[in-house]
Amino acid sequence: MFDAWAYSIASVMAVSLVSLIGAFTLPFSQEKVRSFLIYMVSFSAGALFGDAFIHLLPEAAEEAAGFTPALAIYLISGIIISFIIEKFIRWRHCHLPTTEEHPHPLALMNLVGDGVHNFIDGLIIGGSYLLSAPVGFATTLAVIFHEIPQEIGDYGVLIHGGFTKKKALLFNFLTALTSILGAIVALAISAFVPNITTFLVPFAAGIFIYVAGTDLIPELHKEVEPSKSLAQLAWFVLGIIVMLALLLLGG
C-alpha cells in the first residue's frame, strides 16, 4: 500500500544526503568542477521545466477540472515567493564555484537562504506525494538533479567564507535537513486541509519554472562557444526526456 509519509520522508532524506556531495569535489580543480557543473545545470534546468510542465501542471489541472484562474494564481504565487526569497533574503541559487567573475553572498546569509529553500523543497516533495507515487518520485528526482550543482556551489561558498571543509559539510547538511521539516508540514497540513494539493502542486510548478528560467538558463547563456552550447542544449533536452520517460513508465 502506498504510504505518502514513508515515501516523502525517504525522499527528503535522500535529498538531504546530496548536500554532502561537496566532499567528492575536493580532489578536482575548480576548472574541472565548473566544466562538469555547467552541463549538470543544463540537465537540471530541463528536469525542472519537464517536471513542472509534464507532471505537476497537468496533475494540477486535472484535479482542478481545468487550468482555472485560481490555479494560475497559485502558479504565479510560487514565482512571487521565489522572487521574494532572492530579493529580500538576498540569496540566490549557487551552482558554480565562487570566483571574481562569479561572486556569491556571504556564507552565513547563504545558509539562511539555503535553509528556507530546502524547507520549500520539502513542502514540494510532500505535496507531490499527496497526489501520487509517480508524481512524487518524478519531483524528487527533479529536486535531486537540481540539488547536485546547487550543493556543490553552496559548499564552495562556505569554504570561500572561511569555513573549514568539515564545518562546511556539516552546516550544509544541517540546512538540508530543513527539507524534512517541510515535508512533515505539508503532510500534516493535508490532514486538516484535504485539498491542499490544489495549491501546493501549481505553487511548486511556479517555483520550478522560476528557478529554471531565472537562475539556471542565464548561467547557461554565459557560454558562447558553439560546441559547448550545443552540448548544453543536449543535456537540457535530456533532462526533459527523463521527465517524459518517467511519465510514460508511471502510466
Image (tube, rainbow, N blue to C red):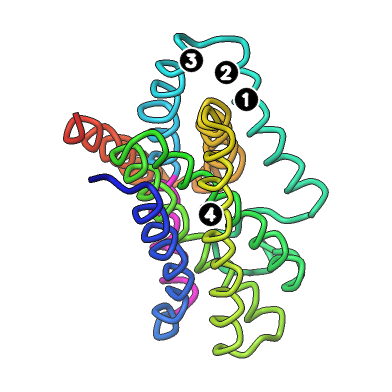
State the separation of the CA atoms marked 2 and 3.
7 Å
Residue at the spot of label 4: 184
Q: Nearer the viewer, mark 3 or mark 4?
A: 4
Seen from the viewer's position, the closer of residues 46 and 244 is 244
Q: Classify mark 4: helix, strand or loop.
A: helix
State the separation of the CA atoms marked 3 and 4.
24 Å
State the separation of the CA atoms marked 1 and 4.
21 Å
Q: Nearer the viewer, mark 1 or mark 4?
A: 4
Contact? badges 2 and 1 (CB < 8 Å):
yes
Q: Is residue 212 above or below residue 219?
A: above
Extent of the magenta region: 29-44
User: Residue 75, image x and y in percent?
Assistant: 59, 25
First in sequence, mark 3 or 4: give its number.
3
First in sequence, mark 4 or 2: give its number.
2
Q: Nearer the viewer, mark 2 or mark 3?
A: 3
Contact? badges 1 and 3 (CB < 8 Å):
no
Badge 2 amino acid: Leu
State the separation of the CA atoms marked 2 and 1.
5 Å
The answer to whether residue 250 is magenta is: no
Residue at the spot of label 1: 74
First in sequence, mark 2 or 3: give its number.
3
Query: In the picture, which quadrant includes the N terminus?
Result: top left
Query: Which numbered marker is on residue 71?
Result: 2
